[in-house]
Image (cartoon, helix red, strand yellow):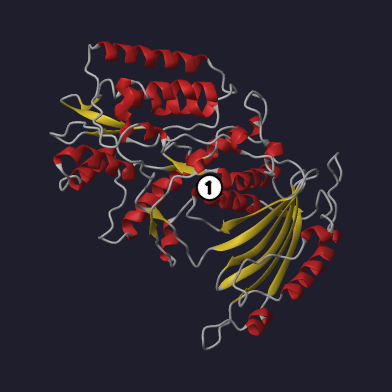
Amino acid sequence: MVGSRRWRCAWLLAVALGVATPGNAQDAGFWSFLTPGTPLPRCVESTEAHRDATARLELLDQYLDRVSDSTPVAAPTRELHALLKSECFLPAAETDRLPRPDSTLALKQWWDAGGREWLETYLELPELGDVTHLRPHVGLPPDTRPTLAASTDRDDPLRSLVCRLDDAACGVETLGWIQRAVLAFDSHRTVQLEDDRRVLRNDITPVARTEEAASELCAADMRTADDGSRYQTWRDCLETQRPKTTALPLGRIKAPTTGWLIISGRRGHYGFCDTTSAYDLDSGAAFVLESCSGLQLNSDGSVDRTLTDAGRVDHVRAGKISVDNVREALWMMLLQEKTSRIQLRAGWYPLPDGLEPHTVAHAPMFDVNVFNTAMSSTAQTTLAWRWLPITGSEITGEVIWPFSYDAAEDHAASLLDVAERGLVAGCVPRRPPPESQLGLPDMRVNPGDAPPERAFYRKVQAAYKQWARAPLCTSTPRTGK
């Protein structure tokens, strides 16, 4: 998890607009049939239009409850869009974040995460709060999550691992990993928000902690707006304040259980170890080379590579690690690029006193969060990883070490650390992979700091000879390679 020690390192803060991506799967052009400037009043209760809208909403709820997750999504989406284009739901044009789900599972998840309740607010504003002081609230819809089975294209190396939505038994071994990732993402977001408040300058307003605080902040933002645009100004401001959390895509992939995971890269900065490691996902065999030193600097601040390399001390280890731990770490590394930062559930924001909902059709907006932070630290390095499965093509990637300001990458680094700390030196359940599969180590550091590639590879070759001489454990796996 992100710890306070990280903030003692150097960091860079970048403030940028966040533009909606395909991963957010929203439809900013849905309301293009409306003429900008057209008033969109809410239906009055007890009218025929209101009764018809209530009945249609209930019918859609029943329909989505019956339809299976693997049903083609086109028909359910048409039903939802038809409802949105009916008279009483046109005020929903106050937001451009409408679902464009890539699967029926994604649509149903959006519906259950508050999509239905959000639509109900256009029939009657909910009154929430303390029983002695109920206040009308408006809703912000959740985002839709991408679905692995639908978003993984034919050329994606993960395709062979992705489970079909109608295969309930596929990937069940990862259910605990999914839960652990969800908890890690939530914890990462909580800590990062607290740290953001400590480091942001006074002239930058961070995302509000609560819906009530966001409503108050945005009420101040609307004071300079014209009377006719006060509500929309407040409502647009809420879009910049809504909380986003890192989320896994819907669906599952099978656990990676065979082949070798090769990790290479520098760990540490002024004091560092250049490393190459190989882990067998079937037996837990582990082979590690660490070539450690400390940067020796010239008077101009550049690295004296000769003195730095002269101080190297090599550590060669062989033994066993937990296959479950290394499989989970690779599972997260495989999925880290598939995650997205989204609003997982509908949010409820109290209307400022005296403000009435007044929606007017307007041009599409971008989906933005005012404060997206991109940070780095001198304590961070980049590790390159390669998975060489028994069948199929190798898959490559990278992970920031030992922590990341991206929740998914941070969790992957944490899981890798857990797996590697469990190495028990001694006998090995399997011989190392062919030396040719190790490849040239990829340090991912400034060329001025990196060791000569060939010279370091000679260290890997020397380490390989030691790995090959490691004693085999008495009990060997029944499956061989």
Q: Quadrant of residue 178?
A: top right
Q: Is residue 345 above or below residue 60?
A: below
Q: Quadrant of residue 353?
A: top left
Q: Residue at x 61, y 84 (%)?
A: 304
Q: Is residue 234 above or below residue 200?
A: above
Q: Is residue 376 above or below residue 149?
A: below
Residue 356: x and y, percent? 17, 31
Taking depth in this image into account, of 69 and 258 the one nearest to the observer is 69
Q: Residue at x 45, y 47 (%)?
A: 188
Residue at image mark 1: 408
Residue 399: x and y, percent? 59, 55
Q: Is residue 18 left or right of residue 479?
A: left
Taking depth in this image into account, of 323 and 261 the one nearest to the observer is 261
Taking depth in this image into account, of 144 and 334 the one nearest to the observer is 144
Q: Residue at x 48, y 50 (%)?
A: 1
Residue 367: x and y, percent? 39, 44
Q: Is residue 345 visible?
A: no
Taking depth in this image into account, of 440 and 310 the one nearest to the observer is 440
Q: Residues within 10 Å of mark 1 (few under 14, many from 20)?
A: many
Q: Quadrant of residue 314?
A: bottom right
Q: What type is the residue that disc 1 sits on?
A: Ala
Q: Which SS class for mark 1?
A: helix
